[in-house]
């Protein structure tokens, strides 16, 4: 086995788009990979010092969309350009937005699934950012991406994951088994 020093290589990593408004209601989006589910209705995100971070300080509500193959270019764009020095960022991204029904944040309707979230806690706050602990207030799913049983169908969404080692976006592949089921073969 080859050894490596500590790296942010937890795999697989999501490609999440954080949607916020600033204090004047101007929408913004940014790409975030360092995030995870914390329990049934909590998520964590590792935030640097971005325009999105100041928006979150002014208004602790946001949306979190899951990037797909179809939204990859816009999703990467909002992760490499800051609204701090590119006021036309959202126009250039080509993303379509409307006000979220339950939080004071924009929903980008190009994405298959979006969480509506509220910041509960900021941990390890410093000039370089903080960890957010946020509550999932509601989940919005474009009806195109629902399964027969009315729940979201991950396989229809064409979601992508972030490869932090070679900086790629990788499309999710085939369903290969049943969770809480495959292991029963060895019981
Ligand atoms: C693939 C990818 C993943 C990223 N993950 C994070 C992250 O987890 N946390 C973070 O603070 N910034 C992350 N960024 C950087 C921000 O998205 C980027 O700095 C963005 O331009 C901030 O925009 P804003 O200043 O308009 O809010 C990521 C960027 C990319 C391309």
Image (cartoon, rainbow, N blue to C red):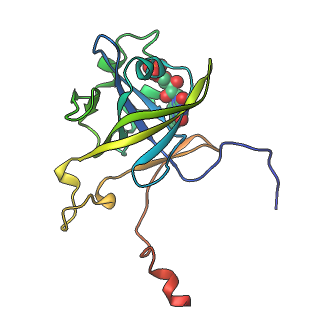
- 112 vs 133, left or right, is left
At which x and y percent is residue 112?
Answer: 28, 46
**Could you tell me which residue is drawn at 29 percent across and 18 percent down?**
91
- 176 vs 116, left or right, is right
**Could you tell me which residue is drawn at 46 percent across and 44 percent down?**
43
Above or below: residue 124 compared with residue 24 = below
Name the quadrant of the C terminus.
bottom right
Above or below: residue 137 compared with residue 108 = below
Q: How many marks?
A: 0
Which residue extends farthest front? Answer: 120
- 91 vs 45, left or right, is left
**Could you tell me which residue is drawn at 39 percent across and 38 percent down?**
72
At which x and y percent is residue 62?
Answer: 35, 31
Above or below: residue 104 compared with residue 87 = below
Q: Is residue 66 visible?
A: no
Name the quadrant of the N terminus.
bottom right
Q: Nearer the viewer, residue 174 or 57?
A: 57
At which x and y percent is residue 27?
Answer: 31, 20
Q: Nearer the viewer, residue 187 or 86?
A: 187
At which x and y percent is residue 79?
Answer: 47, 28
- Quarter holding residue 111: top left
- Quarter holding residue 83: top left
**Could you tell me which residue is drawn at 65 percent across and 47 percent down?**
9
Q: Is residue 171 visible?
A: yes
């Amino acid at each position: 086995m080859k050894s490596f020093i500590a790296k942010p290589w937890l795999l697989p990593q999501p490609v999440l788009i954080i949607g916020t408004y600033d204090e004047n209601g101007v929408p913004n989006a940014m790409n975030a990979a360092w995030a995870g589910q914390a329990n049934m209705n909590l998520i964590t995100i590792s935030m640097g010092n971005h325009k999105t971070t100041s928006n979150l300080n002014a208004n602790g509500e946001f949306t979190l969309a899951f990037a797909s193959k179809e939204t990859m270019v816009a999703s990467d764009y909002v992760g490499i350009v800051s609204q701090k020095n590119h006021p036309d960022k959202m126009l250039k991204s080509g993303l379509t937005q409307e006000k979220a029904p339950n939080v004071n944040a924009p929903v980008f309707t190009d994405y298959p699934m979006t969480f509506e979230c509220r910041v509960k806690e900021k941990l390890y706050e410093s000039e370089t950012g903080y960890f957010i602990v946020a509550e999932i207030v509601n989940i919005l799913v474009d009806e195109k991406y629902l399964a027969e049983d009315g729940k979201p169908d991950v396989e229809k969404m064409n979601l992508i994951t972030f490869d932090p080692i070679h900086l790629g976006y990788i499309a999710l592949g085939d369903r290969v088994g049943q969770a809480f089921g495959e292991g029963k073969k060895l019981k």
